[in-house]
Amino acid sequence: MNAEKPAPVYYFRFSLGTRYLHGILIAIFLGLAGTGMTLHFSDTSWARAFAHTIGGFEAILFLHKFCALILTAGFLLHVGEMLYRGVVKGEDGIFWGPTSLVPQSKDFVDLYRHVKWFFWLGGKPKFDRYAYWEKFDYWAVFWGMAIIGVSGYMLWFAPFFAQLLPGYMLNVALLVHGEEALLAVWFIFIIHFFNSHLRPEKFPMDPVIFTGRVSEDELREERPLEYERLVERGRLEGLRADAPPRWLTNFARGIAVVSIGTGFILLVLTLVAYFTGF
């Protein structure tokens, strides 16, 4: 008789707070993307139909501003937490080191080696807690939120900013807000979705951001440097977790299907509108 395969061992990768924040980010970004692209392409038939269903473009604008306030609060909360942990508490690994999201020289070396590996010209690089593409995703969203947010509030409170800045700056803000938002939508629904979920080894989704857990085999295979460091420092067992419950796995799948499906629809609609005007 064949021996039973031992049950996989799991470890926590993301805290509950991080998962809650990411969940809010998903919902609010989809809200902002749906309402923002409807306003951006307001002359298209699908945008007019969607706005009519919701209650008109005024309702779309109200929802867009509401989502913007929540996203701003989440953004400031995240920045405040990072500053508190890194500056006030002096926590290691926030602004530099193997567990930091700040790009470092190793990331550029990993990118070079990864490209060589793609073409069978070298071995696969060993990644740490965050791979170079995850850092790129993070900072693209970070700076995008800052640029879109500042320009958006300039448009929201135009009379106030018109007293402080030349009038043409509001035109610049309108251009920057619309084009940067469109770029953000395309980036999230193409680059981020592929990097996080649609890669062959993750397809159709990676549930880790929802369950917070990663199996030992996955951790050892995908992030060998982090695994080795945790073992060496005796911290791995402290992250031991139960297997994700079925309801949580199913919930993650549901959220992924809705998010990816909504993103794909918006991607197609905006691409068609941008290149054809329909």
Image (cartoon, helix red, strand yellow):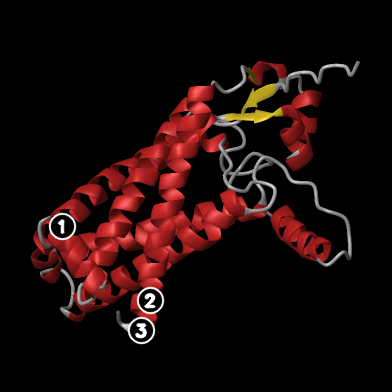
The local crowd at label 2, few if under 14, some if 14 to 19, many if 20 or more residues have their Cα within 10 Å, is few
- Label 2: which secondary element: helix
Question: Could you tell me if the residues under marks 2 and 3 are in contact, i.e. CB atoms within 8 Å?
Answer: yes
- Residue that appears at 72% across and 42% down: 128
Instruction: State the residue in front, 53 or 138.
Output: 53
Instruction: State the residue in front, 167 or 53.
Output: 53
Q: Is residue 85 visible?
A: no
Q: For this view, does 236 lie left or right of residue 64?
A: right
- Where residue 197 appears, as percent x and y from the top left, is 58, 49
Residue bearing the label numbered 1: 53
- Identified by mark 3, the residue type is Thr
Q: Is residue 96 above or below residue 214?
A: below
Quadrant location of the C terminus in the rendered image = bottom left
Q: Residue furthest right?
A: 1
The local crowd at label 1, few if under 14, some if 14 to 19, many if 20 or more residues have their Cα within 10 Å, is few
Residue bearing the label numbered 3: 276
- Residue that appears at 81% across and 52% down: 125
Residue bearing the label numbered 2: 272
The image quarter containing residue 53 is bottom left
Q: For this view, does 256 lie left or right of residue 7?
A: left
- Where residue 156 appears, as percent x and y from the top left, is 16, 61
Q: CA distance from mark 1 to mark 3?
A: 24 Å
